[in-house]
Structure formats: C-alpha cells, structure tokens
Image: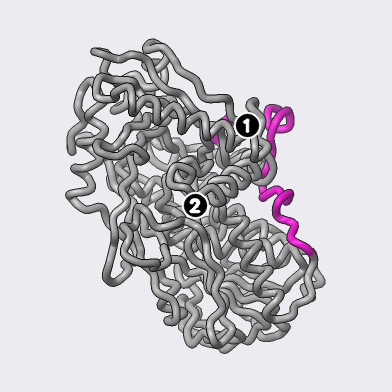
Amino acid sequence: MNGTSARPSSALNAARRQREWAALGDETIDVLVIGGGITGAGVALDAASRGLRTVLVDKHDLAFGTSRWSSKLVHGGLRYLASGGVGIAHESAVERDILLTRTAPHLTRALPQVVPLLPNIGAAQKALVRIGFLAGDVLRRTAGTSASVLPRSRLVAAAEALRFAPTVRRDGLRGGLLAWDGQLVDDARLVVAIARTAALHGASVLTRVAASDVTGTSAVLTDRLTGETRTVTARSVINATGVWADQVDPSIELRPSRGTHLVFDAAAFGGLTASLTVPIPGSTSRFIFAFPAAHNRVYLGLTDEEAPGPVPDVPHATEAEIDFLLDTVNTVLREPLTRNDIRGTYAGLRPLLRTGDDSTADISREHAVLTSPTGLITVVGGKLTTYRKMAEDTVDAAIAHAHLTASPCRTRDLPLIGAVSGKARDGIEAPNRLVERYGSEATDILELIDRDPALAAPVAPGIDVTAAEFVFATTHEGALDIDDLLDRRTRIGLVDSDRKAATPAAEAAFIRP
C-alpha cells in the first residue's frame, strides 16, 4: 500500500523526478508500470487511486509514442458497430460520456460532424450514413449521454452545411447529414493530466527512465539523463508500451497499423467549425475527416495501413498516404487543396494484436490483458477513448495475479487535474483558450504573468501560446527539454516553421532564475 507520509502534489518537474528516482528501492513497490502513454498513465492513475504504491517509467516522455499521434477525437464507436462490434461500440460510448461529463470536461467538447450530400453520394449511401448516425444516437442514449451534451443527429439544409464547412462545393449540394461526437483539445495534454492526477495520488512518474530485463516482479531501470542504473522489484509489473510491447514481452505478437494526418492552417478550410466527414470511395463504412484543432489549424486524416517491420520512435507519413488524403477530401471541396497547402504531417502506429489474415482496418480494436509465463502483465490493443476501462481491467488482473490488497476502482468518477465544467467553468476569469487547455488551472498561468508580465508575450509571432505556459510546463507538467515543450505540452512542433520560431522561447523557459 502507499506508504508516503507527505501529502503528494500533482506538480511534475525535474526536482521531483530527481527525488523520486533517488528514493527508488527505499520502499516496496506494488505496481511498476512501463510506458507513459495514455494506457500506462491510465494504469498508474487507477492503481495509485486504489492505494497501491505505484511507479510509472517511460524511456522518453509522457505521450511520446502513439498517444500524441491520434485524431484527438473521443469516439463513440460507430465504426465498430457497423462491423458488428456491439460490445466495443457500447464501451466506447460509455467511456466517451465519462470523459465528457465527469473526468475531463475541460479537455473535451462536443464536435459536430457533417457529411455533405453531393452528387457522388447516391441514395443508397445516404441511407447507410443516415442509419449509421441514428445507430449512433441509440449508442449515445444507451451510454446515458444527454442530448444536451451530444445533440441528436439530423438532416441539415445546404446553407447550414456550408456554415459548418464553408469550402464545400456548392454545385449539386443537397444539404448534409449532421451528427455529434467528442473531441479532445489535445491527446498529449490528456495524458499529462492523467499522469499528474496519478502523481497527486502518490504515484512516482519518471520520464527518461528506460526499463530492461523485465519480469513479472522486477526490472532494471536506467536513468537516461545520468546513466545511473538500479534494479527494482515490484509485486506486479505492467507492460503498457503500446507498439513496443512485444519488445518487452516477446511472447506476444503485434500487427501495427499506421494512421496518418495532414496539418493545414485553418484558413485553408475557410473557418471550419465541424468535422468535415468524407466517405472513402468504394467503402460503405470508412471515412476521412478534416476538423478544427489547436493553434488555429485543421487536421485531415485518417489512413489505416499495415506497418510491418521495425517500429520507429517517430513514424512518418508516406507519399501515397498524403496523396490518398488529398484526393479524397478534394472530392467535396470547391477549390482543391494541394501539397503547397500542407503545413505538416504526422503519423502514429496502433498496437493491434496479430489475429490472422485480415487487413488491419478490420482487426478488432478491443483491448487484451495478457499474462506472460514470468507473470508480466501486458495490455495491448484498445483505443484512446477506452483507456480508462483498459486500465481498470489491467489493474484488476494485477491485483488478482499478485494477490494485492487494494480499494475498488475509482476512476469512473475521479476528475482529472483541472477538471471543471458548467457554471464553475464559466466563472473562471481567464481567456477561453487557456481554460480549454488548463481548466481550473488557467488562473495559475495568469498568476505567473502577474508575477512577471514579460511572460504574457507569445512564444513566437502569430502563435497562441505564451511564455508563461512554457514555464508552467517545466514546473508542473514534467517537461524536461525543449522537445517536450514544443512537441507534447503544446503541438507547435507539428509545423516546422513554427517550431523554429518558438525554439528560443522554449530554451529560455529552462534558464529562468
């Protein structure tokens, strides 16, 4: 059980990391979690909030891998319903509701999605999409989500479709099909919030710490900043390393798939306020979508291509995927987009279990919790939306296997750091862009500016991030270098020119007195 005497804080920083690294071995660890993505952070929070002494390590940074390359959406699972996955569709809808209404209302929001009804969409395909959206309404109701949180789907006139997506072709536009889903302000920020909440409950969160020689009860940990190595023991060790899981536990076999997105300036889509959802030619259940994102951008995705071979630290979009996304979205746009409009790209790998000869687009996204012969527990598969349920199942398995004494799972109703909604959110005296990123902690950013007005300056011209946010990331969000600031605490780094412009401010954040 958690034997710490001082009241834990949610603040993650270099000083805390150094203290907690030095203290390893002085107490018994109940749960060692390897991997600091959405799944590992969720496992750490679940375990720590049950009273288990928990340590989370990642050889890079929080959300370094797949968890920062998602579509930033909180899906209700409609696609899985279309392929017969009723269970995972319902689970996704339930977990979406938990995120939107209880655990992370500050980092999530309702997002309209509109399918423009153009001549290339015939009556049969229109009917299929409409039926799918109605099924989504049923999912929403069975998950207990109010229509005030996610409105019902409906048909809209051409004028309304154009208000949502102004750059859609007008010729032949017969209106649109409108539905609602959830969107994250940012996926990496969600991971950081989960990890900080775990730290608040006593977990040690140690980035730049690599694990090797992993068994069900031990691992060799190496501080990648100093080279120092130590062997730690734990009552249970959990492998939550995503697409690298089979490198930690060779007894499993993964079949990763790559999802690619393109990054545009918001102006390229003329003030897009919805997810512009475009059917993929030849498919009745797959779509690509363009949606508004942080820093006045639009993301366009998503591919689903098998990605065999060695797993890179940072995947990259292929030329064929870029062409596919451009060609597909241009079927509905008045003025075609070209490669010159693209500001950046990103790609992520999904850790799918190898199940047979199906394409990766058809492999189930259900998660699996596996126990190796050494007792190492591995969690793979799943999706960002269902991270909490994945974590609950994983910790349940660890408790049963290691005979741990712990409280019941608490995370269904445990707000993350900064969580605020309704009148309390409306009453926060801070710019809305800060409230969307930090929730109730938005006022902490303003307090930094009050103490040092120079921190009100943007980190670069035209970028909506202040120097105070960079400082807060170093003192509270565990950022240890400029890559953490530019690529994960913010998403400035997705556009190379923005990254270069903001680098001096990122460097300055680490040399403050």
Q: Which residue range is magenta in the image?
A: 408-433
The amino acid marked with disc number 1 is Ala
The amino acid marked with disc number 2 is Ala
Q: Say which quadrant the C terminus sits in.
A: bottom right
- In the drawing, does residue 286 fall left or right of residue 111? left
Q: Position of residue 467 (x, y in %)?
A: 49, 44
Name which residue lies at 46% across and 72% down.
Answer: 59
* Disc 1 target residue: 430
Check disc 2: other Cα within 10 Å, few if <14, some if 14-19, many if 20+: many
Name which residue lies at 48% across and 59% down.
Answer: 63
Tell me which corner region of the image, top left, top right, bottom left or bottom right, holds residue 245: bottom left
Determine the secondary structure under disc 1: loop
Name which residue lies at 33% across and 42% down.
Answer: 301
Q: Say which quadrant the N terminus sits in.
A: bottom right
Q: Position of residue 97 (x, y in %)?
A: 63, 41
Check disc 1: other Cα within 10 Å, few if <14, some if 14-19, many if 20+: some
Q: Is residue 411 magenta?
A: yes
Front residue of 405/219: it is 405
- In the drawing, does residue 277 fall left or right of residue 308? right
* Disc 2 target residue: 188
Determine the secondary structure under disc 2: helix
In this picture the colour scheme is one colour
Relative to 136, say whether 489 is above or below: below
Residue 231 in sight here: yes
